[in-house]
Image (cartoon, coloured by chain):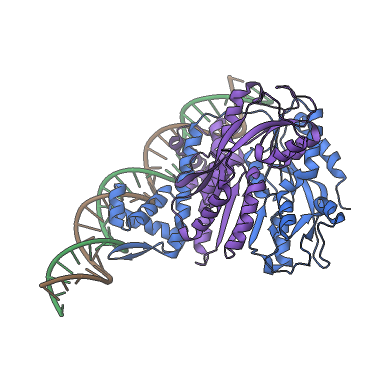
Chain colours: A purple, B blue, C brown, D green
Amino acid sequence: MDINLARTFLMVAETGSFIDAAHRLNITQSTVSARIKGLEDLLGRPVFERSKSGADLTAAGEQFHKHALALVRVWQRAQLEVSLSDQHRDHIAIGAPATLWHGVLLKTIAKLRSETPDIAISATAGLQDVLTQRLIEGTLDLAIMYRPIQPPGHTVEHLFDEEFVLVTSARTAPKKGSSDYMFINWGADFQRDHATAYPELIKPGLSLDLGSNPLEYVLANELSAYFPMRLVKPYLSRGRLKQPKRARRFVYPVYLVYPEARDEDAYDPILDMLRRECGRYSTD
Amino acid sequence: MDINLARTFLMVAETGSFIDAAHRLNITQSTVSARIKGLEDLLGRPVFERSKSGADLTAAGEQFHKHALALVRVWQRAQLEVSLSDQHRDHIAIGAPATLWHGVLLKTIAKLRSETPDIAISATAGLQDVLTQRLIEGTLDLAIMYRPIQPPGHTVEHLFDEEFVLVTSARTAPKKGSSDYMFINWGADFQRDHATAYPELIKPGLSLDLGSNPLEYVLANELSAYFPMRLVKPYLSRGRLKQPKRARRFVYPVYLVYPEARDEDAYDPILDMLRRECGRYSTD
DNA sequence: TCTATCTATCGAAATTTTCGATAGTGGTCA
DNA sequence: TGACCACTATCGAAAATTTCGATAGATAGA
């Protein structure tokens, strides 16, 4: 697989045409055609649907698009970083879903700062699939997430278990299927189990991916949604939120994900602290 | 750049020898030598130091190692994901930095839900470059962000201006360069202007990318950081935060970004509401 | 039906990659 | 010091791949 196949793919996707891509890339149209065919042979699926008006991405092509960008970016970044001076930057990029940052990881970050003042820390909230992608790309060093799809070359280590409960700010119990239910994306396992438990709610009218913000939104709007018990407990105590009696609960493990091949001197103090700080949060 | 160069590099790195790598890869030693030479030509630097006892990574080689792994992994993942079937979903995906969600866009979402009940909305917080990337990829339909690098094929429309001020929860004014300063990534313009205004703070010990969460963190930890005035005004009024007298202020326009080629029936009601709801937030 | 415009394919030429043989380098040992 | 050993580098030839220019094939529009 040559990066030029990815570049050619991206140019066809951008221009919508083999001929225009050829002009932009300073090669002939038949070279573009041959490269795309070669790429499709490697992938085992067509990536463009050809027509007289040009070429449109297939579903596989749309799926491949982000990988093509990643390939080009990783190679560009490789060239850049290798060409820079050999000065080693001491910084760790850590990622977790926004929920996990709130009330758990931020406190841990504060302790990390005091114990490892020479290591710069970059903290990022994001969706699991984005975090996984960045682990693979090397732009993220360490992640805490609900059960990840195992990134190749990474260790996945259990930290604690998180319980998700349905809560509502409405005065009467919400009805399943009604428009006051809001789906929040807590990760792939939750999505699957939620779809199994509530098939009629697979496509709610509103879904959010914003970490702690949805809690404020639910409070303000008489909605119901699933949240980690850790976050809603104070509101349940104060009566701001209620738990419908028969709603399902979901419990998911939270994992630490980090490279197998790593500088242990840099990583292990951080891993040890995360294990200590997070160990107490298990719902057991 | 062919992925096989990366694979060959990784095998030499693992075995410590061109000959052993050749055996493992089922090619001749001279092919390994030629590939490594080709890679070094592309990178402009040697990645191995050769000797009678084999080959050891240079500093550039160590730098390249993670990228080589990333290239191989991205390609493997691309093949995997393209081979899986892909179900197309029909809804509007909206993205904005977490800051903009908080206190502005969430209210707008509530109104959108009541006015357009048939359109499923997916709301995502994220960094601008990720949002821009997803706009280009087509996995995001609409974004609200500080000045974006113009995504090809998209309209960029001014919504309002946002003012960033330095605030502190410490009892005494923070000193620039001290460890109580926390850099929050509010986007490329802010990064550039901040670097210009405070070159000594280009590499703070802690940087976050978590939207509204950093505010709570600052309040709890006697730190200082830049925030949008819109978010901190209530805390300034209550005395929970202070504004250092001589700190720089930054004002940035906020833009709506959406595709030029779009289904206007689906988009325009949403665009109109965003224009109405956000118009009032300008600092003018 | 004809024309225009796009992609696909063909055969030839150009370029790249691989191989097997061997040169070059350097460490070890008698 | 010289022989030997073990590794990488280079060479020329062969094989494989890529690219090109010409043209076939498909299809939409007039």
Tell me the quarter of the picture where residue B261 sits.
top right
In the image, residue A38 sits, relative to residue B196, either above or below, namely above
| Residue nearest the viewer, comparing B281 with A121 | A121
Q: Quadrant of the N terminus of chain A?
A: top left
Say left or right for B108 vs A13: right
Q: Residue at x 59, y 49 (%)?
A: A95
Question: Is there any visible trace of residue B263 in the rendered image?
Answer: no
Q: Residue at x 40, y 52 (%)?
A: B5
Q: Residue at x 33, y 65 (%)?
A: B50
Q: Residue at x 69, y 51 (%)?
A: B149
Q: Quadrant of the C terminus of chain A?
A: top right
Question: Is there any visible trace of residue A247 in the rendered image?
Answer: yes
> Percent from the top left, x then y, of residue C19?
25, 50
In the image, residue B156 sits, relative to residue B225, either above or below, namely above
Tell me the quarter of the picture where residue A145 sits.
top right
| Residue nearest the viewer, comparing B273 with B98 | B98
Say left or right for A15 vs B145: left
> Percent from the top left, x then y, of residue A88?
52, 65
Total numbered labels placed on residues in the image: 0
Tell me the quarter of the picture where residue B102 sits.
top right
| Residue nearest the viewer, comparing A217 with A71 | A217
> Percent from the top left, x then y, of residue B258?
73, 40
Say left or right for B132 vs B167: left
